[in-house]
Image (spheres, rainbow, N blue to C red):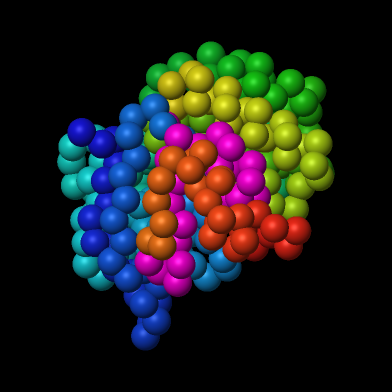
Amino acid sequence: MSLLYIDDLRVNYGGIEALKGISLSVEKGEIVTLIGANGAGKSTTLRTISGLISAKTGTITYDGSVISGQSPQKIVSEGICMVPEGRRVFPNLTVLENLRIGAYLRNDEIQPDIDHVYQLFPRLKERSWQLAGTLSGGEQQMLAVGRALMMRPKLLMMDEPSLGLAPLVIRDIFRIIQTLHDEGITILLVEQNANAALRIADSAYVLETGRIGMHGTGEALLNDPRVKEAYLGKSKSK
């Protein structure tokens, strides 16, 4: 049984059909990546899974239960957490306060998880009392990932984690994604850096104007001439 299964999902924005009946699955322990051009529906897919957008039709099944129509808080409590595009940290709160907010639905001891985040991101420990708004873009991305980890997710969704970051920082972010995968977290990744995303993906989907255009292993799509031409050339599309 798939950890996450989406069946014939359709989502409208006003009169525009953003998702046109997509179906996909994420197996437990996998890294699954979604690539595609701007406006293809990648972020819409994540936001619909999270409960932030309501689907017109279709079902989303997680760990054997239908979660379509549930509140975002309920979905988070079930173990699905998202690192949003643009990081969206709380700029006027410290690093530590941002991490504590990430655990807002928990009633147990969170210090071990804070310590784990600091092990993954030593720079956050050094800046634990610094306001999040004064961090660099890369550090804010690390904080956004750490904040999501505070809920001990079974499925971690990441929306464009490398966007706007320097190459060395991007390398660190992908190293952390691989580390989280090795720790047993299932990851659904939307990423404009198709080359890097496909290299670490077990499975991948190409979204084209709200539809699944291609599906295969990360390696297969990395070597597909159509993907190479559209997404892996000198001018990479988001």
Residue 234: x percent and y percent? 75, 58
Q: Which of these two is toward me, 229 or 175? A: 229
141 in magenta = no
Residue at 48% x, 51% y is 34
Determine the residue located farthest toward the front in the rendered image.
225
Residue at 73% across / 40% down in the picture? 170
Residue 236 x, y percent position in the rendering: 69, 59
Q: Identify the image quadrant of the N terminus.
A: top left
Q: Is residue 205 above or below residue 37?
A: above
Tell me residue 75's x, y (percent): 32, 44
Q: In the image, what residue occupies the spot 61% across and 55% down?
A: 228
Is 90 in front, or is 21? 21
User: Going by the image, does 92 lie left or right of 190?
Assistant: right
| Horizontal arrangement in the rendering, residue 34 relative to residue 73 (left or right) | right
Q: State which region is magenta.
A: 186-211
Q: How many marks?
A: 0
Residue nearer the viewer, 131 or 26: 26
Q: Position of residue 167 (x, y in %)?
A: 80, 42
